[in-house]
Image (cartoon, rainbow, N blue to C red):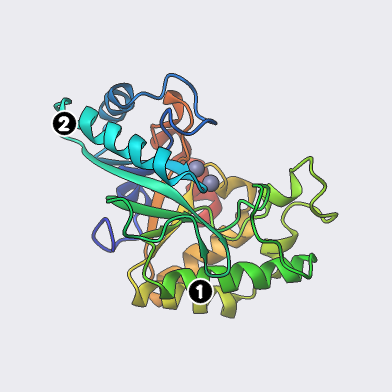
Amino acid sequence: MYFHEPTYDLDILARQNLHIHALFSGCAKREMVLSDIIKTAENAGLEAIAITDHIFDQNEEFRQNVKELREQLNTIATDIKVYIGGELSAYGVDKYSFKGEEIELDYRLWAHNHYHVTGWEQPEDRSPEGYKKHMIATITNLIKADKADCIAHPFHDSYLTNSSRGLVDFSKGSVPNCFTENEIGDLLTLAKQHETAFELNLNVVPAFPDIYRKMYNIGKEVGAQFNIGTDAHKLENIDTKQFIDIAKRVLIG
Ligand SMILES: [Zn+2]
Ligand SMILES: [Zn+2]
């Protein structure tokens, strides 16, 4: 479902930060405790935040984490809307770290491109075109399964090309460059039908300007919606406003 009224006003969208990692994500700084995350969001003037810790395959740990976060949230007085969600793993076509009934989540953000993670499905054809097709199939089925409120950092290939694992031999941006406007339009149209948003991840938008400008403009044409998140792993990255001007330059010019 959507988490805001339909709009393409980036300042309005930036009142929410729907991608924040707390302590449970091993990659997040130890300072990312819920009370301090909320305090920081309040100071930044945000209206809503989502806690989106990773879930790869450790369902039981994740369940404990969500329970703990909910208990903590009950003791915190705040006017901010706080969603306890997750950054779930669509680790291949029809492959999901989270089926949907195990744990009650307020916000289901799905990553489809953490290709560096052990066990993530790789396409047989490991060319940029092969990865593009794999991304399209993964996202299409994920949206059709009605599992996703939002697709995290769509289309980008940082996790393939920045990895020291030697997953691929092409350069960063090769996969997003393969997407045609029709392919992006088809995905966004499908997303609209299922009320799935695509993420404007302020952490990666500047690194992939071409694909995200296309995504934003095509999304406007077909009536798809976007959610903003900073992928914060430390407190100083919770405030969306510090990133919004550069995002505007990328998306609007
Ligand atoms: Zn991610
Ligand atoms: Zn993340």
x%, y% of residue 2?
28, 61
> Is residue 109 or residue 180 the one in the foreground?
109
**Picture quarter containing residue 14?**
top left
From this view, report whether residue 137 is shown above or below residue 212: below
Give whichever of discs 1 and 2 has the lower sequence position.
Answer: 2
Instruction: Give the farthest residue toward the front.
Output: 60
Q: Quadrant of residue 197?
A: bottom left
Q: Is residue 9 left or right of residue 212?
A: left
Question: Which residue corresponds to the image point at 76% horizontal and 65% vertical from the top-left?
Answer: 128
- The local secondary structure at tag 1 comes to helix
Provide the residue designation for mark 2: 74
Label 2 Cα neighbours within 10 Å, binned few <14 / some 14-19 / many ≥20:
few
Q: Mark 1 and mark 2: span between their CA atoms?
A: 36 Å
Give 147 or 78, whichever is nearer the viewer: 147
Q: Which residue is mark 1?
A: 140
146 on left or right of 134:
left
Residue 151 vertical position relative to residue 235 in the rendered view, above or below: below
Q: Position of residue 67 (x, y in %)?
A: 27, 37
Residue drawn at x 55%, y 58% is 112
Dot 1 crowding, Cα within 10 Å, few <14, some 14–19, many 20+: some
Query: Residue 64 versus residue 157: which sits nearer the camera?
Result: 64
Residue 188: image location, x then y, percent: 46, 72
Q: What is the count of numbered marks? A: 2
Tell me which amino acid carries mark 1. Thr
Q: Residue at x 27, y 51 (%)?
A: 104
